[in-house]
Amino acid sequence: MSIVRKSIENSLCFGVYDGNEQVGFARLVTDYATFGWMCDVFILPSHRGRGLGKWLVECVVAHPDVKALRRILLSSRDAHDLYEKYGGFHSLHYPANWMEKFTETPFRKSKLPSLPEENKSSG
């Protein structure tokens, strides 16, 4: 649990509540000057279909500490339309310019997909 706690303590966090029950969450990892990374966005299945995800994304990008950032990144498996319509996101302009360093941890084991041959380095 210390990894989750540390990630929340070092992020700008947003919660969605139904009374005292938390039903949604998003966090932004940011330097508060030029860059942010929106992550860990969710609405509980029991509360989906009510516009809460749309509202949450709108709240994040409208926050005073966020709206002046030059770039905000996010990764989504299946909600691209929502982020585009309600957050102003789009595909990367120059995806070939971006790289990542991914380290497996005991917290989350996931297999990365194979890179297309044209993206693999020859050495």
Image: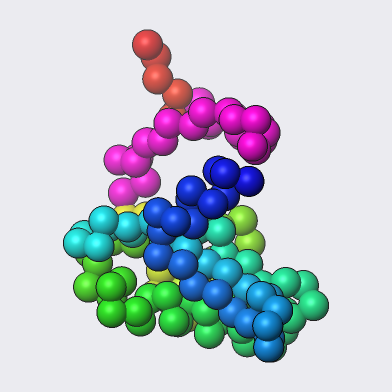
Q: Residue, x 26% and y 56% (percent of image)?
A: 31
- Seen in the picture, residue 78 relative to 97 is either above or below; the reply is below
Which picture quadrant has residue 88?
bottom left
Q: Which residue is situated farthest in the left direction here? A: 33
Q: Residue, x 58% and y 69% (percent of image)?
A: 25
- Locate residue 94 relative to residue 112 in the image: left or right: left
Q: Is 101 part of what is drawn in magenta?
A: yes
Q: Which residue is situated farthest in the right direction here? A: 46
Q: Which residue is situated farthest in the top direction here? A: 123
Where residue 87 appears, as percent x and y from the top left, is 43, 76
Where residue 123 appears, as percent x and y from the top left, is 37, 11
Q: Is residue 103 visible?
A: yes
Q: Is residue 73 visible?
A: no
Q: Residue, x 28% and y 73% (percent of image)?
A: 65
Q: In the image, which residues are magenta?
A: 94-118
- Seen in the picture, residue 72 relative to 49 is either above or below; the reply is above
Where residue 54 appears, as percent x and y from the top left, is 55, 81
Where residue 114 appears, as percent x and y from the top left, is 59, 29
Which picture quadrant has residue 53?
bottom right
In the image, 53 versus 17, the foreground residue is: 17
Q: Main secondary structure of the magenta part?
A: loop
- Seen in the picture, residue 12 relative to 15 is either above or below; the reply is above
In the image, 71 versus 43, the foreground residue is: 43
Which picture quadrant has residue 66?
bottom left
Q: Is 38 part of what is drawn in magenta?
A: no
In the image, 87 versus 64, the foreground residue is: 64
- Seen in the picture, residue 105 relative to 32 is either above or below; the reply is above
